[in-house]
Amino acid sequence: MATERPPSALVLRSPFVDLASVGQRHYPFLPVRWLLRDEFPTKDAVARVKAPVTVVFGAEDSIVPAEQSREVAQAAGARTIEVPGADHNDPVFSDGPELIDAIAGAIR
């Protein structure tokens, strides 16, 4: 959506490179790329975003590996906020200071 309607700023929380990459990690025995209809190519799309991007993610994310979020951030030339020890659904990602600071910094 950010490529079609450019925002003033964009904050991504635990983004994956593409849906198949994260699916393959959890289901290595399935041909995930063949089964998916929607690719959700986050890394490719975010590289075309013209707004400042901030990526917030947990270092111990068990759903979306931290390396995928780092890869998305690099493609976007984004500011990164890595929360040490945080997993994907930890409360820090709903109301923690890291997320609040990322959003506040993006809108300044």
Image: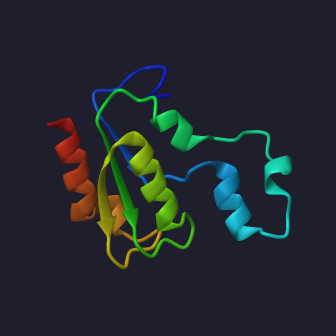
Residue at the image position 70 percent from the left and 52 percent from the top: 20
Left or right, residue 20 beside residue 8? right
Q: Position of residue 34 (x, y in %)?
A: 85, 48
Q: Which percent across, then down, holds residue 97?
A: 21, 63
Q: In the picture, residue 87 is in which quadrant?
A: bottom left
Left or right of residue 22: residue 52: left
| Above or below: residue 79 compared with residue 37 | below
Q: Is residue 69 visible?
A: yes
How many numbered marks, from 0 up? 0
Q: Is residue 9 left or right of residue 60?
A: left
Query: Which residue lies at the image location 73% right of the left edge and 62% below the top edge?
Result: 24
Q: Tell me, yes or no, if residue 14 can be seen here.
A: no
Q: Is residue 6 above or below residue 85?
A: above
Q: Quick check: 31 above or below 88?
A: above
Q: Nearer the viewer, residue 94 or 59?
A: 59
Q: Is residue 44 above or below residue 104?
A: above
